[in-house]
Amino acid sequence: MRRTSPFRALWGANALSNLADGLVFVTMPLVAAGLTDDPRLVAGLATTYALVRLVVALPVGVHVDRLDRRTLLVVANALRGFAVLGLAVSIQSGVASLAVLYAVMAVVGVLESAADGAAVAVLPSIVPRDRLDRANARITGTQLVADEFVGPPLGGILFALAAAVPVYATGGLWVAAGAVALALPRRARDASVPADPTDPPPSVFREAAAGVRWLAGHRVVGSLALIGGLASVGYMLPFSVLVLFAGERLGLDAAGYGVLLAASALGGLAGSAIAAPLRARLGSRWTITSALGLGAASLAGLAVTRDPIVAGALLALYILHAVVWGICATSLRQRLVPADLLGRVGAAGRVVSLLGLAAGSALGGVLATAGIALPTVAGAIVFTACAVLAGVALRRATDAEG
């Protein structure tokens, strides 16, 4: 029997995991709404999930570097699958509660951070440097299909059968993702520096701090983290109030808003197809700079249009930019960060992005009270700044091309 290649194993595990994520996006709010009619408690589920990921990002990054990444992928996916299967049993038996739902989603948040960090860190060990863009693009394209096109409608259909059905499906998909990840190779032990068994292991705090210091001291990777944080602010400024923008400026109802989001996701698929060829032709610096410039231009156009079709095209271009920039930035970081620091440096960058998302969301809500188009204008300004910063700060990115 022919063995599955390591990349196909990682790609397959990610695909199953992303499909589960798409089901969660629709299913868990519906489960929460069935347990309470308080909108604060329903919205608080997403807030809790985001806060958990922020709090555990750095310690999880340490363990991504300490542990065998293949084992971490297997265990993290399997455990979150079993946690969700337990929730499904409680729903089916009628003993589910908001406390149980919140606890399960907190556990899922921790384990998702571990699985995501391990997946990004393991890729450079199984894919040649010159194919990282292509590999990241294939993973991103599959993620978009699962998250945006398949998972949400499938979750709605399964929920209509019974509340527990999509929850069972989600748990099963994560367990299956863990099983597929078993085909990945184990991480080779570094025998060049033998550890003294009498020495106490360094603290998690010290190891996390080492990752933060490395990130802050590296011009290119540190710049990517700063740009990522600013881009997160720019993203959430308009998207935190996009549903209101769609209603007030574009005259769309709920169904129209759904179509608008689906159209924007098509741009992401196009971005995943062109990212690697663009990087090969232009190099990382100019691909990232041009993509961020496209993000600024598309938001500037969105701020002034009232035509839903034009808005859909502009949002598709915006998501295209986000995917291209994200793939190139991830591949560049994977080339430049030492293998034994990938987990910690990635986690430090993730903290910056999560803080940017929180700041952008809060600022978007404040600006929208003065004018519904103001958050989009502000987003365009932020992305213009990101493009300028990328052009200036990534001049040494060519050292990592290949």
Image (cartoon, helix red, strand yellow):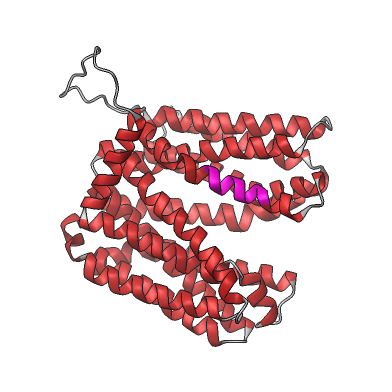
- Looking at the image, which is closer to me, 74 or 277? 74
Residue 42 seen from this side:
yes
Residue 277 horizontal side relative to residue 402, left or right: right
Range drawn in magenta: 44-52
**For residue 379, above or below residue 22:** below
Residue 106 located within the stretch drawn in magenta: no
Where the C terminus falls, by quadrant? bottom left
- Is residue 22 shown to the viewer in this render? no
Main SS of residues in magenta:
helix
The answer to which quarter of the image holds residue 83 is: top right
Viewer-side residue, 195 vs 338: 195
> Is 61 left or right of 305, judged from the image as shown?
left
**Residue 187, percent across and down?**
31, 28
Pinpoint residue 68: horizontal percent, then vertical percent.
Answer: 36, 27
Please count the marks in the image.
Answer: 0
Image quadrant of residue 164? top right
Q: Position of residue 54 (x, y in %)?
A: 48, 46
* 365, 279: nearer the viewer: 365
**44 to the left or right of 146:** right
Asked if residue 381 is positioned above or below residue 116 in the image, the reply reads below
**Farthest residue in the top direction?**
198
- Residue 207 vs residue 185, the one in the foreground: 207
Residue 182 in picture, x, y percent from top left: 45, 28
**In the picture provided, is 274 more to the left or to the right than 50?**
left
Is residue 47 located in the magenta-colored stretch of the structure?
Answer: yes
Residue sitting at 47 percent across and 56 percent down?
A: 141
Residue plotted at (66% across, 70% down): 243
Location of the N terminus (image quadrant): top left
Q: Quadrant of residue 196?
A: top left
